Image: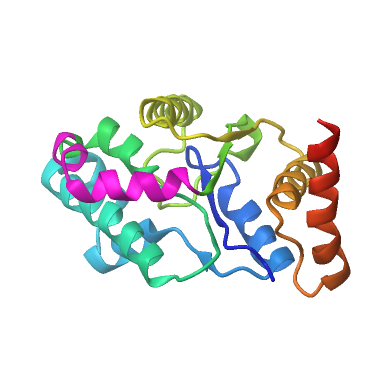
Amino acid sequence: MQPTVRIYLVGAHATGKTTLARWIRDHYGLPMISEVARGVLAEMEAQLDALRSNVDLVDRYQRQVFERQIEAEVRQQGSFVSDRAFCNLAYAGHHATVLGDIATDPRLSAYLESVRSGLVFFLRPHRELVVADGVRAGVEWEEVVRIDGMVKLLLELFRIPYIPVASLAMQERVRLVERVLDLSGLVPGGDRERSEATPRRLATNGAAN
């Protein structure tokens, strides 16, 4: 029986979170919580230019993204992979004025406890991945670096354990994720033999240490 594992991929935009989340979804047969920001943006019928200039609109947008992420995770029982967690707080701190309100929201404390009990992979930025798509809050390299720094600050501030993913190569990213999930007891769907062997291997490693 597979363990319940909540997997979060956090980081700035244009770091490959969604690509890696889709690989985890397909390889391990897990439900995936897709980026909620796109859905909120579509419902608000807001354009990127408006989100850069209308502070009230940005505040409403960031608050709804925060609330929708929590709601999406509550609806998903059991294991899942999400291509973000509290990442929008980094954008709220950079573009909006609601971060102070969200920081005192009791839902945030409860949500952070949930994230701490999951597996958090922190994807670091690479210039090669910065591509304009008409939705992101910013696609300039300097913007990506700023948001990356704010996400790291939030991880440390909230005391959330995380695994850094610094490599650009998808192969190396996949190998890292495989190793971590293997140690957690999660195995590719349908691989019964490996599923039974993993606890024994972990027990052996523990005895050796």
What number of labels is visible?
0
Q: Quadrant of the N terminus?
A: bottom right
> Does the image show residue 49?
no
* Identity of the residue furthest to the front in this view: 207
Q: Quadrant of the C terminus?
A: top right
Residue 166 vs 133, above or below: the answer is above
Q: Position of residue 20 (x, y in %)?
A: 65, 52
Q: Magenta span has 142?
A: no
> Does the image show residue 124?
yes
- Nearer-the-camera pick, 129 or 100: 100
The answer to which image quadrant residue 29 occupies is bottom right
Q: Residue at x 85, y 50 (%)?
A: 201
The answer to which image quadrant residue 30 occupies is bottom right
Bounds of the magenta segment: 100-117
- Decide if residue 122 is on the left or right side of residue 155: right
Q: Residue at x 55, y 35 (%)?
A: 162
- Decide if residue 80 is on the left or right side of residue 102: right
- Decide if residue 118 is on the left or right side of residue 176: left
The answer to which image quadrant residue 204 occupies is top right
Q: Position of residue 27 (x, y in %)?
A: 74, 64
Q: Residue at x 44, y 70 (%)?
A: 76
- Nearer-the-camera pick, 178 or 39: 178
Q: Main secondary structure of the magenta part?
A: helix
Q: Position of residue 131 (x, y in %)?
A: 56, 43
